[in-house]
Image (tube, rainbow, N blue to C red):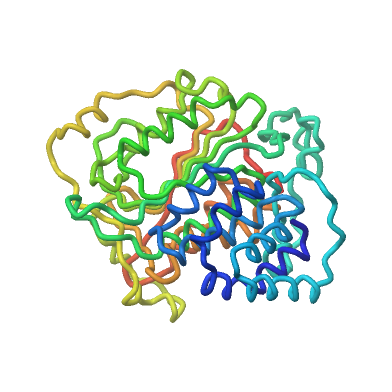
Amino acid sequence: MDEAERRALRRCRVRLVRELQVAALWDALLSRELFTAAMVEDLQHAGSGSRSDQARQLVIDLETRGSQALPLFISCLEDTGQDALASCLRMSRQAVKPSKLTPGKLAPVVLGPAELQPQVVRPSVPRPTDNGSGRFSDVCVQEISKGNGDLAYALNADPCGYCLIINNVNFCPESRLTARGGSNIDCEKLQRRFCLLRFTVEVKWDLTAKQMVQALVELARRDHSALDCCVVVVLSHGCEASHRQFPGAVYGTDGCPVSIEKIVNIFNGTGCPSLGGKPKLFFIQACGGEQKDHGFAVASASPEDRSPGSDSEPDAVPFQEGPGPFDQLDAVSSLPTPSDIFVSYSTFPGFVSWRNTKSGSWYVETLDGVFEQWAHAEDLQTLLLRVANAVSQKGVYKQIPGCFNFLRKKLYFKM
């Protein structure tokens, strides 16, 4: 889908989400080969499974399809009697003067930041650029001349790797965990952001602890030999857990925890040999415990950041003392030398992580904004320092993200 078609789709996005009759579309989408059966199944389970969530995810996914995605989608609307929406899309395409379509097989494409949001004026900051041979230019030339040729990971592949997002929103009654309002907003932001960063993004919703482990093992067992990186994002409730290297645990929808240590361990050299020597990034939006940080007095804070607001809530669950069945396993597990691993936590271990039910979590909202403005110029660790500084200035209750960095080199995302 070209830039003009994406702009046309965005013009009609609100109306599509409001009026789209998704139940009638599935067969048409399959018959036109616009989506595979597996992709349709994922769409049907998007978010809470409601019509609006399905429609919203369908519109998002359309932007990642091939050059004939929009005209085929319009044909599907006409086939299912949704002529008003089809006409709206056709008029929007004419208004933005779309470029000529070329026939060809549908294939996932990666969107550029300028194609999705208004142009942001960024400072001119030199960054290492990969010239395709594993060497870097600009500021890295100076470092290479000093003998630091291995300054940064080379992300040459396109796409550069897989990104799996696990978004747990609705939990079974027996778990006594509340629904995580606002998490779908986080999920949409991260899905689009990592598409822009040249990853093949997959989203899985509302997984039990067992299903989470199965999804992670399946990802680890894939052949990553032609790829350069792997990203795992978990959005869920969290708690403290016994550990050796990586603190904390995240909950499946059945109320059973999966330790961060176990998640990382799935991608070690034994479980995922094709990612050996390649960066493996983990982003965890979940509470690290139930403590609320009141912070300490500073000169001033932005007025809009002085209160968490009535729509903010923590992703916290009390830590159960004692060697329970899950913590006992975590306590005796061990990792190989943790090279090429980066784990970013939304909050300090033991403390809550705030999430606004209307705008999403503080951490993801800030992460997305920082990546949008600075990922073209700065390495991952510098980006996360910006995130930590920005989040730490929010709210009456305080929160500060942190990370465990076992990368051997700097990591600059492929733009």
Indicate the position of residue 75 as horizontal and vertical percent values: 69, 61
Residue depicted at x 42% and y 57%: 47
Residue 345 seen in the current view: no
Quadrant in which the N terminus appears:
bottom right
| Front in this rendered view, residue 376 or 140 | 376
Q: Residue at x 46, y 24 (%)?
A: 268
> Which residue is more in the foreground, 130 or 302?
130
Q: Is residue 305 left or right of residue 170?
A: right
Residue 14 position within the rendered picture, expressed as x and y whole percent measured from the top left: 57, 74
Q: Is residue 279 left or right of residue 319?
A: right
- Dividing the picture into quadrants, the one containing residue 357 is bottom left
Q: Is residue 337 above or below residue 17?
A: above
Q: Which residue is situated farthest in the bottom direction here?
A: 303
Percent from the top left, x then y, of residue 390?
A: 49, 64
Residue 147, quarter of picture: top right
On the rendered structure, is 89 left or right of 388?
Answer: right
Which residue is painted at 71% across and 38% down in the image?
A: 158
Confirm whether residue 44 shows in the render.
Answer: yes
Q: Please give the name of the residue rendered at 73% of the width and 35% of the height, measured from the top-left corner.
A: 156
Image coords of residue 281 (percent x, y): 52, 39
